[in-house]
């Protein structure tokens, strides 16, 4: 899952970014509205965390802009202000949740998980392809009736594949979404993690759920059936 963190407090941004990456999220950071717009123009995100006060604007206006771009991106407002009017302004602008500083990091991650698992077209409660199931809320993966332990990054990679069943996802797209801009596009990190997923999901009673499409990328599940022309 790829998150956008918009926060001008350098120390807080670094702490939150480090914690989220350790939890397996890909994170891009921005300290201004201008930087945030750039990231939103070039990347696809699963959630945005917005500070209310920014040097060149505010999170409320940025939230309104995000909502004009598309209604489905979850937005968590993060601010030092606790006045009711500020909370109302943020929620009226389209924010999905509101967290006041100072906060405990476990509460932040709990709110992120809650927003990511809200039922929507792109966020099913439990993801399932064949006999592979993944629960984003409990962060548990099963192959049939067997629980499969995964690292945080392996979990994020499998979750992204399961959210796009039957689609061939290029290494570049996986790298951009599951990792972030800090990773070298020429790295073989995607291939290594796919190999680890294959090993952990292997079952004597079923085929390999992951398919390598030579020269194109990876897919989980069968491709969509082609319908004959009338």
Image (cartoon, rainbow, N blue to C red):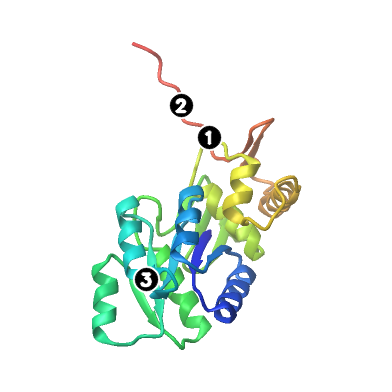
Q: Number of labelled discs?
A: 3
Could you tell me residue 69's position as x and y percent? 34, 51
Q: In terms of image quadrants, where is residue 126?
A: bottom left
Instruction: Determine contact: label 1, label 2, CB under 8 Å.
Output: yes
Position of 44 compared to 57: left or right? right
Residue at (35% x, 77% y) in the render: 98
Q: Which residue lies furthest to the top in this view?
A: 230
Residue at (23% x, 82% y) in the render: 85
> Which mark is on residue 22?
none
**Residue hosting label 1:** 222
Which is nearer the eye, 123 or 175?
175
Q: Which residue lies furthest to the front in this view?
A: 56
Could you tell me residue 77's position as x and y percent? 38, 73
**Residue hosting label 2:** 225
| Label 2 to label 3: alpha-carbon separation | 47 Å
Q: Residues within 10 Å of mark 3 (few under 14, many from 20)?
A: some
Residue at (57% x, 60% y) in the render: 141
**Residue hosting label 3:** 58
| Label 1 to label 3: alpha-carbon separation | 45 Å
């Amino acid at each position: 899952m790829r998150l956008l963190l918009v926060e001008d407090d350098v120390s807080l941004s670094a702490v939150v970014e480090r914690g989220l990456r350790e939890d397996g999220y890909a994170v891009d950071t921005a300290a201004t509205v201008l930087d945030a717009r750039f990231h939103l123009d070039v990347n696809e995100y699963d959630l945005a965390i917005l500070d209310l006060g920014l040097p060149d604007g505010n999170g409320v206006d940025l939230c309104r802009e995000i909502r004009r771009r598309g209604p489905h991106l979850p937005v968590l407002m993060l601010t030092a202000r606790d006045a009711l009017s500020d909370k109302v302004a943020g929620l009226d602008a389209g924010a999905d949740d509101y967290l006041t500083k100072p906060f405990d990091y476990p509460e932040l991650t709990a709110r992120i998980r809650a927003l990511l698992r809200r039922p929507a077209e792109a966020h099913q409660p439990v993801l399932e392809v064949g006999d592979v199931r993944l629960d984003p809320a409990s962060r548990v993966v099963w192959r049939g009736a067997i629980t499969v332990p995964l690292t945080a990054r392996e979990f994020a990679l499998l979750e992204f594949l399961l959210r796009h069943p039957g689609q061939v996802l290029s290494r570049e797209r996986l790298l951009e979404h599951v990792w972030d801009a800090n990773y070298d596009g020429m790295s073989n990190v995607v291939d290594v993690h796919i190999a680890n997923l294959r090993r952990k999901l292997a079952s004597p009673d079923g085929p390999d759920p992951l398919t390598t499409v030579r020269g194109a990328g990876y897919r989980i599940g069968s491709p969509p059936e082609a319908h004959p022309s009338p």
